[in-house]
Amino acid sequence: MKADSLIVLHGWSMNPAVFDDLRRCLPAGSSVHTPSLPGYPGSAWPSRDSFAREVEAMGRDLPAGRLVGWSLGGLYAIELAHRFPGRFDALALIASNPCFVRRGGWPCALEASAFDDFYADLERDWRRALRRFLALQTLGGPGQRGVLRALARAIEDAGEPGADVLRLGLDRLRALDCRATLAGLAQPRLLVLGDHDRLVPPALGLEMTDLAPEIRVESVAGAAHAPFLSHPARVANLLAGFGQ
């Protein structure tokens, strides 16, 4: 069955190694595919100017199954579920916002000025900017130092992403608005939030039920932006039975 496979997509600046703890907590024999996003080390797809072309290439190559997208990976997962409904029969978003920038009627997102700061940091010293972003992902969560070490170790294991792909990723996060696409999906949908997340506000859960009333929203108590690292067993349990 298609739903026996999980296709798990990482976030901005990261890579598949970040999901190692989650993979270990999933039921024995689970089929888990963790590709690198386009342009990242180990990716089967080069980064292109067009988000649509990236998604088309990914959809042709990825196995069928249930999509899981963390942060930036959630935007790819939403679009993949929309373009290839016959291949991907469920969608789970982890600490991901269908629209990461605050807009009229969408208060649960980052201010556009936050992205200006990210861009400026990248231009000054992109490696230092990367370290600061990793720290921001862990703020407020339990075992902050341990989660930060796990994020840093994932980058060490797979290699640093290039500055160009980091800039392109910020462009995606700032420009894409996938709210209507997410609301229109027919597949079962799950949103997993950390209630201490500084990048994706926990109140997004309430906004999401207005946007897509059928979506299931789960909050991981004490988690920040990487709940699959701070609470891998809890997130694995949510994913294991979802969409089957």
Image (cartoon, rainbow, N blue to C red):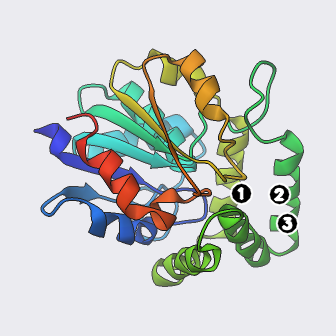
The answer to whether residue 25 shows anywhere in this view is yes
Query: Which residue has dot 2 on it?
Result: 119
212 and 89: which is toward the camera: 212
- The residue drawn where x is 71% and y is 57% is 167
| Contact flag, marks 1 and 2 (Cβ < 8 Å) | yes
Q: Position of residue 22 (x, y in %)?
A: 36, 64
Residue 226, placed above or below residue 107: below
Secondary element type, mark 1: helix
Work out whether 145 lies above or below 182.
below
Disc 3 and disc 2 in contact, CB within 8 angstroms: yes
Which sits earlier in the primary sequence, circle 1 or circle 2?
2
In three-dimensional space, the C-alpha distance between marks 3 and 2, rounded to whole angstroms, equals 5 Å
Badge number at residue 167: 1
Going by the numbered disc 2, the residue's amino acid type is Tyr
**Residue matched to label 3:** 121
Residue at 25% x, 60% y is 26
Q: Quadrant of the N terminus?
A: top left
Q: Secondary structure at mark 3?
A: helix
